[in-house]
Image (spheres, rainbow, N blue to C red):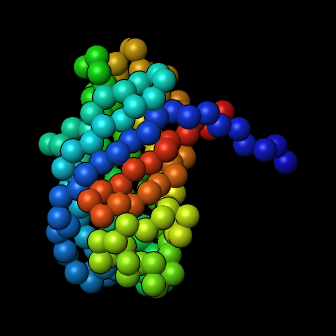
């Protein structure tokens, strides 16, 4: 089996608005989490997360883990718009989940938070992103979330 190789794509940091609680739906406990602000920075692209077009349709599953369904609009420093969509999972012990829910800062090493971003753009300067497979390693903070995003080579 071939080992996966990667290289850093960017670091993204977002502050989140308070959650909208939909409650227990047929799929699980559903929350919608709008993005308040954000930035991303890497060797090949940098910019801001647009606050008028993005959020997380978060699902707490029956096993206690969280499944992310995120759509973001990134605006690069030179004006390109890039759609970033990702699904992911956050899993932790009941104790760690309770600490995160209480707004405590918990070391990222105490839980599992991974995502699989995909990108879409028509800007010729960034169409290479349309062909990238990426993985994000996340850190949930009391006011938001951050990811180190890696391009899989």
Pinpoint residue 45: horizontal percent, then vertical percent: 41, 24
Left or right of 15? Residue 13 is right
Residue 73 in view, yes or no? no
Q: Residue, x 48% and y 23% (percent of image)? A: 43
Q: Residue at x 30, y 57 (%)?
A: 144
The structure residue drawn at horizontal position 30% and vertical position 48%, both measured from the top left corner, is 14
**Residue 71 location in percent, x, y?**
31, 48
Q: Looking at the picture, does residue 70 appear above or below residue 26?
A: above
82 or 15: which is nearer to us?
15
Count of all numbered marks drawn on residues in the image: 0
| Residue 116 placement, left or right of 30 | right
Q: Is residue 142 visible?
A: yes
Q: Is residue 104 above or below residue 77?
A: below
Q: Residue furthest right?
A: 1
Taking the image as shown, residue 142 lies to the left or right of residue 149, namely: left
Image coordinates of residue 79 in percent, x first then y, are 25, 19
Q: Quadrant of the C terminus?
A: top right
Of 17 and 125, nearer the camera is 17
Residue drawn 52% across the image and 52% down it: 137
Q: Nearer the viewer, residue 117 or 26?
A: 117
**Position in image of residue 85 (x %, y %):** 38, 46
- Seen in the picture, residue 69 relative to 72 is either above or below; the reply is below
């Amino acid at each position: 089996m071939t080992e996966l190789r990667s290289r850093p794509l960017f670091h993204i940091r977002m502050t989140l608005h308070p959650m909208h609680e939909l409650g227990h739906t047929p799929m699980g406990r559903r929350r919608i989490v709008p993005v308040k602000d954000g930035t991303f920075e890497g060797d090949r692209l940098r910019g801001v997360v647009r606050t008028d077009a993005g959020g997380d349709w978060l699902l707490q599953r029956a096993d206690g883990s969280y499944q992310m369904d995120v759509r973001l609009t990134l605006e690069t420093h030179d004006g390109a718009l890039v759609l970033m969509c990702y699904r992911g999972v956050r899993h932790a012990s009941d104790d760690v989940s309770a600490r995160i829910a209480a707004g405590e800062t918990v070391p990222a090493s105490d839980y599992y938070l991974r995502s699989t971003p995909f990108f879409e753009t028509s800007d010729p300067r960034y169409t290479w992103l349309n062909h990238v497979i990426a993985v994000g390693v996340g850190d949930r903070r009391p006011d938001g979330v951050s990811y180190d995003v890696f391009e899989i080579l």
